Image (tube, rainbow, N blue to C red):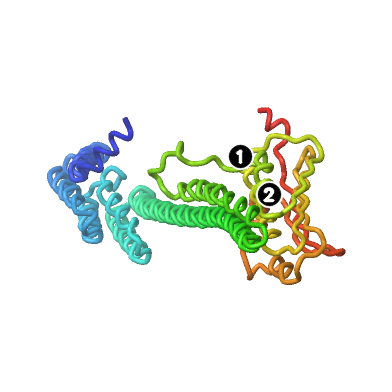
Amino acid sequence: MTEQWKRSAADHPHAVHVVTTSLLLAFTVGGVFLTRTVAAQESLVLWPGLALSAVACAVLLRRHSHPLVVLLVTTACIMAEGFIGYLMTPLLMGPMLVAQYTVSLRPDRRTTWYSAVAAAAGIALTGFIATDSPHEWILGLVNPTAWVLTAAFFGSYVRVRREYAVARAEHATQEREEETRRRVIQERMRIARELHDVVAHHLALANAQAGTAAHLARTRPDQAIAMIEKLPEVTASALRELKAAVGLLRQDTDSQELAPAPVLEQLPQLVETCASVGLDVLVTREGQPRPLPPGLDLTAYRIVQEALTNITKHAVTLSARVRLAYTPHDLTLTITNEAGTHPAAAADWAGPSRGYGLLGMRERALSAGGTFHAGPQPGGGFEVACTLPLPSSEKSTS
């Protein structure tokens, strides 16, 4: 019901002003009769008070477009009623208090308080002249002045609250925009990592297979033909993963048409693909293997894939060891290339400005809340090691 009333009031603002002004006129007229009754003065003329109250309430319809003029007119009407002999009660001063409240809502604070002081001074002067005995000054002088200042304070308080609400809304909008921008950047970086890992891995394997086949074409044509026959498998796998990665950017892509994200269970296929280009990979597992969340499983697979791709592109000794160590709290991945890595390869691995392989692996590990380290070994070779936190047993079972 409250929301319905708010919508109706927003749709018919003029009708709301008319109704509220009519109600205020009724209270003000009541104040005129109450003052005449309390004062017990039969000689007090009634119609000037009613006329002045009607004028004061009527001009309130323009209080939003001309607030200072309306305040001036209502103050003059109330002062005239005071000089006639009416007691300036809150009921009688209602139009003036509403006008003062409206002026106090304006952003110009200096105008607000200048107008409040001027109105209070006018009411105080009226009360001082119209009050005969000093003991009546509280009702005729202090009380009306206090009501005027109270309306000014209340209007200023409402204005400050509205300004604060607007500032909070603007701040919240800026925060939402910043959060949206940050998420877009993170999503772009994630997709860029996916595309880099897919393209770099499969193109490196395809390039190695093509180069090896060209080298063996004259001396061992059978092996060259067998290696060339495996090229469609590598390119088909690359196309499937590219379709899955690019499909994330298309809203109209059917999720059933996309290939599932690779996981650690597909390491044998990855090792077999690496073996087709002559890279001998030994995979060892320690501890009790556990099912991983999809995102963490993909992160672990991509790190192993990128490390093996770098070995394929840069290493002289085409052999690698992949170690998966499971503990109750984390999974440690260690990919090691034996001694014999070309010095330029170590520089390419260690220099983030030369490529995005190490940078992508580091970003994946850190985004999962883990640690990452890569560098040459003291005895030769290169090692990539990262630790990925695993969800607790209670969370995984729940």
Is any atom of residue 137 visible in this view? no
- Residue pointed to by mark 2: 369
For residue 366, side relative to residue 3 (left or right): right
Q: Secondary structure at mark 1?
A: helix
Task: Determine whether 254 is above or below 97 in the image.
Answer: above
- Residue pointed to by mark 1: 294
Given residues 136 and 356, the one toward you in this image is 356
Task: Determine whether 250 is above or below 397 in the image.
Answer: below
For residue 313, side relative to residue 2 (left or right): right
Quarter the C terminus occupies: top right
Q: Which residue lies at the image location 75% right of the left edge and 51% below the top edge?
A: 280
Residue 354 at x, y = what percent? 63, 70
Which amino acid, mark 2?
Gly
Spatial CA span between label 1 and label 2: 15 Å
Q: Which residue lies at the image location 18% right of the left edge and 45% below the top edge?
A: 14
In this view, the residue farthest toward the top is 398
Task: Determine whether 51 is above or below 200 in the image.
Answer: above
Which amino acid, mark 1?
Pro
For residue 196, side relative to residue 162 (left or right): right
